[in-house]
Each structure stands twice: as structure tokens, then as C-alpha cells.
Amino acid sequence: QRRLNQIGETISSIAAPTAAYSLRSITGGDPKAVRVRRSSDDSEQDFTVSEVFSGALVNFVGSGNDGFVETWYDQLGSSNVTQSTSTKQPKIVNAGALLQDANGNPYLEFDGTDDFYNINKTTFRNVSYGYASAVAQYDDTNATNEPVYYASNGVSGSSSRAFLGKLNSGGAAKFVAAGRRTDSDAFRSSLETADTNKNLLTGLFQWGDGEVQLFVNGAAKTAASFLSGAGATSDTDSNTAFIGRFGSSYYDGKIYELIVYNTDQSGNRQALETNIANEYNITLS
């Protein structure tokens, strides 16, 4: 199926993302996927998708060494994410072995302590629609705020435009797609009880239609309406935007892939989710 996705229908052929982070090919070609630092001497090297799977990445890291992702490349080329602090880099190779699940899908392991990336802060500036899909697996169901993706606009960090991941909701761990349209709007959430399975989480941030909705493995959760009604987000740059971080809370677990759009992809959601689910052996509801 991985090969079929590369030569047949790809994510980009369904709809070109605003940004795409993965260890498989999103474009159908052989783009750069990651820049990896090895633990033995801190040397770094870029690797394409084919080199991740061919063993070239593991050979570079070396027997018994760990490998950490300094840069996760946006396969569309405009929004690469880099973590220059070595202790905050997610792991991709552990003791000489590529991190991958039972189906052979590789992933980045975030330690829940300080691993994260800064991401493009302007993606959801003055737009009416947003979309984010992530293949993620949490290490626990603690009631903590651990987004895969988080973007905040406006004048304070509490002005969240988009949050996709795990949230502390009333003392319980919930999967969530949430956010607000304007700085003065209330935070609105579409929720589902969290678990430690490998899941496909999709958030539709329909500011232009006045609501946000979560899908877990293709199953729609109850949508929430924005208090400010329908319209575009405020025309201000984001203060913060992260993969794997919310304030002083950090993602703890595996991230396989993150796809982001700042256009209306509600009509393509099923095709996008089918492509992703086939790649990662996820059963859609």
C-alpha cells in the first residue's frame, strides 16, 4: 500500500496541503523527510523518504546509537520545522533500530518533557477554514494538554485558533479539535474520550461556517459552534504555533504524520482519511 500511495493517488493529488510532515511520500516523489542527528558525535544528515525505508538512515546513525530529528521537512517545501536544541529533539532511532510499529510504519517519539517544534505562525491568519489530520499514539491517558498541533493568534497565548490532540477537559483526558475565531471568542471544543491506540485525528476548523468538529478514525464527533459566529479569523499573526507543545505541557507519544490545510477540505475529508488510513493500517468507522 505504501508503494501504491507513492505511484497512485497521493495526498497531494487529492489536494495539495499547506504543510505536510511525514516519513512516507505525500507528493508521490522522493522528497526530503528528515534531518537526523546521531548521538555518538552529533553529526547530522538529510534523508529522503526512500532513505528512511532503505536502511540508509539507520546505517548513518550506527549500531547502538540513537538518532534524533533536528528538522522535519515540510514536503511541500515552505514550512520546515527545526529544533536546534539537541535535548528537545524527538527520537527516530533507538539503540540502532528505526522506531516503527508492527506494520513497519516509522514514527517520531516525543518524550513528554520538552520535545517540540515551532511551526509556521501565520497559517491561520485571516482565513475562513482550517483542516488538520494527524496519525498519533499517546503513551498515556493522563488528563494533560498535549496537542499534536497548536496555533494561537492575537495578543495572548490563550487566543487559540486551532488545537488538535489531547486535552484536559474537566479532569478527564479527551481527544479534541478546538479553537476560537477571534481573540474575544470563547474556546469551543469537539471532544472524544482519549485512549492509547494509534489513531487518525482530524480537525475541521470551519470558522467561516461558525463551528469546529473532530473526527476520530473517520467517526464524526459532535460539532461545537463558535460564540462569535461565522467569519474569518482575525488578521493578526500568531504568537505561537507548535507541534507537540502547549505552554509548558508537551506531547508524550508517537507522531507518524501531520497534514495541515488553511482552505476548506470538508469535501475531501473522506478521500484524505482513506489514503492515510490505508497507509497506517487504521480501520475507519
Image (cartoon, helix red, strand yellow):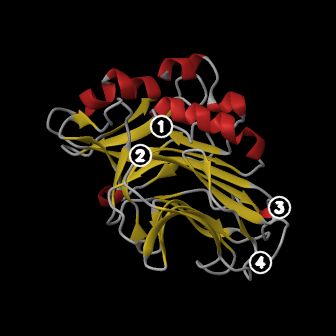
Residue furthest front in the image = 285
**Which residue is depicted at the point 43% across and 73% down?**
172
In the image, 214: left or right of 250?
A: right
Image quadrant in which you'd find residue 272: top right
Crowd band around label 3 with a 10 angstrom C-alpha radius: few (<14), some (14–19), many (20+): some
Circle 2/circle 3 CB separation < 8 Å: no
> Helix, strand or loop at disc 2?
loop
Mark earlier in primary sequence (2, 1):
2
Cα distance between the residues tagged 2 and 3: 30 Å
Left or right: 138 as drawn, with respect to 94:
right
Q: Give the distance between the C-alpha atoms of the residues marked 4 and 2, in whole angstroms.
A: 32 Å
In the rendered image, residue 42, in percent from the top left (x then y), is placed at 26, 46
Say which amino acid is labelled 2: Lys
Tell me residue 1's x, y (percent). Answer: 49, 21
Residue type of the residue flagged with mark 1 = Ile
- Looking at the image, do the residues carrying marks 2 and 1 touch, with CB atoms under 8 Å apart? yes
Q: Callout 4: helix, strand or loop?
A: loop
Q: Which residue is mark 2?
A: 198
Q: Label 3: which residue?
A: 209
Pointer 4 with pointer 3, Cβ within 8 A: no
Dot 4 or dot 3: first in sequence order is 3
Q: Residue at x 43, y 79 (%)?
A: 171
